[in-house]
Image (cartoon, rainbow, N blue to C red):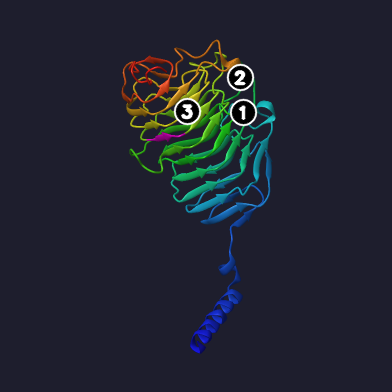
Amino acid sequence: MRYSRRSAAVVFAVTLAVLTLFPSTAMAGPTPVSGCRTLGGPGAYALAADIAVVDATCIEITASNVTLDLAGHTLSCTGSGFAGSCQVPEFTSRGVSIAPELTGITLKGPGTITGFDNGVVITGSNAHVKGLTIVGPACDPIDCPRPVSNGILVLGGSGASLSANSVRGYLYGLRLFEVRCRGADPICVFNGNTVRDNTHWGILVDESSGYTITRNVVASNGTTAFFEAFHGGGIALGTGGDGSTIVGNTAANNVGWGIGLAPATNGNTIINNTARGNRAGGVRSGIGGFEAADLMAFPGSSNTWNGNNRCHTEAGVVPPTVCNPGE
């Protein structure tokens, strides 16, 4: 026992010496961020306060291996744009901007990004974005003159993992553009997001491939005003959207189709989704989208539609047996 006590005392003394000589190393936490800035070095960062800007981008990440925690705080933008926000016709302000060719990026909540023209923009970098609330100004769902704006926009090159985010009040909620992923790549996933009350599409996969879109709730997106083709809707794979899997999502009360594939989309699999009441839901009913339906596809495509989807209506080249019998 005497030897054990002496050993414990030695260990305690050494530990105390390390803490005394190197306090910053032993007790280091995230670097606090209290204003808009560029995060140009690897490491952990956390917002230390709410940050408000006028017609400007706030946080730019330009280094790999960065984690930014909003830590319950809010990034907000007000200005000359739609309804006093920073949503303008030009592609301008970003709440958080992630530069190209980065790896090891994590942007996480809880926390809110509000009013920016683009809440989060990821350009050709692997990134995880999770647990954020991203909000634009509300507007009349019948006729909303909102300019082009994106809750989360993933551009070009490698994909991003978006999970458990809540996005509303943009033209597009979650949008991919020219992103090419290998099938089943774990970074290329939209999982468990809530996307609602966006003026055009809730989730748009545009000229992109190889994504898994799973367990998202996509509701009340689109507008009955005829300012763009099809009025928008729930989940859409645009032309060139190939090799993706859409599984276990709920699409409800969207103006256009609930889940749909544009012409020349191939090799996609649509299984076990629930699509109900699209082209319906209060003030959104009446006009709807072009050939609006819960599930829809155009001719000229080759995709797999499994019969365990739950829906009321099908259109286009969706096989008539895709919805559960009796739905």
Residue 34: percent from left, percent from top: 67, 51
Residue at 48% in and 54% down: 65
Instruction: Indicate the position of residue 128 as horizontal and vertical percent values.
Output: 48, 45
Q: How far apart in space, not on screen, are marks 1 and 3 (Cα)?
A: 30 Å
Marking on residue 141: 2
Segment tinted magenta in the rendering: 211-215
Disc 1 and disc 3 in contact, CB within 8 angstroms: no
Instruction: Give me the C-alpha separation between circle 2 and circle 1.
Output: 18 Å
Residue 112: quadrant of the picture:
top right
Residue 231 image offset from top left, x and y in percent: 52, 17
**Along the line of sight, the residue nearer the viewer: 98 or 291:** 291
* Residue 209 inside the magenta-drawn segment: no
Q: Secondary structure at mark 3?
A: strand
Which quadrant is home to the C terminus?
top left
Q: What secondary structure characterizes most of the magenta part?
A: strand
* 285 displayed left or right of 75: left
User: What residue appears at the point 68 percent right and 49 percent down from the top-left corner?
Assistant: 49
Find residue 250 and name its label: 3
What's the residue at 51%, 89% (across, down)?
A: 2
Q: CA distance from mark 2 to mark 3?
A: 20 Å
| Residue that mark 1 sits on | 88
Q: Earlier in the sequence, mark 2 or mark 3?
A: 2
